[in-house]
Amino acid sequence: MDTALIKLKQLLSSRYGKGLELRRLMDLSKLRIDSEPVIQGNDLYIPIVVQEQFLGTAVIPHGWELCEDKKKSVTQLVRMVLEPKLYSEYLERRETNLQSLESTTFSTENVTIFGDDEDLNEDTIVEQKNLVTSLLHLQGHDNSLIKKVALQIHEFSTRWAFVPFEDVSKEIRSAMDICNLGGMTLFVENVEALSEEHQALLAEYVKSPRSLVEPLILTSSNLSFEKLSSRLVNQALVAEIKDSYLEVERAPLSSEMLRELLDLFFHKDENQDLH
């Protein structure tokens, strides 16, 4: 565990008799727009926001027991420690994503790195709200290439965060939990390794059209579809993967061509309705 986080927990315990849980992702509907702390149930939720970028939430179990002055003191202490720590991590992830994209053969002329929402115009926002596909499956032999294509798709979809599924899997117990993560990209690497329970949750989530304010699921595997279908136990998920299957080695290398291909995937239900 990070030293700063350990010391923060020790201070909260010794001064206020309270613990601390750090949730990188959560249901944003629980938080106030002005990012002020709120009591939900018995707990105190403290949003960590730097330069209008939501970075996570500090949860103080049984925080309702604190008087108003102590709530303010706890909030100030938590933010003093976590804001620089989480923002630094955010910038590092952002730089890593940018470097990964720049190392590809793709053109990044029209790419938006998450957090740069000011670059989006109104037409782009309106268009992206109409996305209906909630899952894309990436198959290939090169894990590095799969990750690069996943990042490119993430940038095209203007999602606010690119998150490995394993980082949030313990917090997901229902399809609604996935919805509540908001407009991010969930990257499920080696989907065949998912538990039966998580396969069922993904199948439940992706069976309905989704918008930009809900997660886009990117699954991946080195296995061919035939081998993958024999490894997955949830046939509903197999069917969804079959309908949204992209071989990364055969994906177009130009930004414009890849964007056109993804447009067909994202709007496939709308395109079918035209026939």
Image: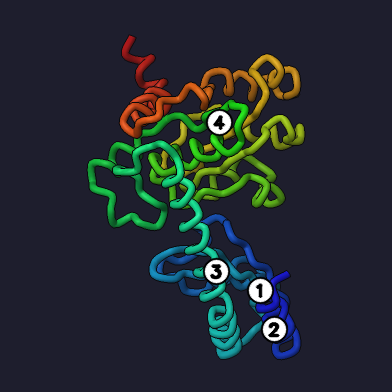
For the residue marked with disc 3, what is the amino acid?
A: Leu
Q: Is residue 204 visible?
A: no
For the residue marked with disc 1, what is the amino acid?
A: Ile
Nearer the observer: mark 1 or 2; the answer is: 2
Residue marked by disc 2: 12
For the residue marked with disc 2, what is the amino acid?
A: Leu
Which residue is drawn at the image coordinates 55% and 29% (left, top)? 138
Q: Is residue 217 visible?
A: yes
Q: Earlier in the sequence, mark 3 or mark 4?
A: 3
Image marks 1 and 3: residues in contact by CB distance under 8 Å? no
Q: Is residue 207 above or below residue 162?
A: above
Q: Label 2 vs label 4: CA separation? A: 41 Å
Residue marked by disc 3: 86
Image marks 1 and 2: residues in contact by CB distance under 8 Å? yes
Residue marked by disc 1: 60
Q: Is residue 252 above or below residue 46?
A: above
Mark number, residue 206: 4
Q: Earlier in the sequence, mark 1 or mark 2?
A: 2
Q: Label 1 vs label 3: CA separation? A: 17 Å
In the depicted view, which residue is nearer to us: 96 or 81?
96
Q: Label 1 vs label 2: CA separation? A: 9 Å
Q: Is residue 127 left or right of residue 42?
A: left
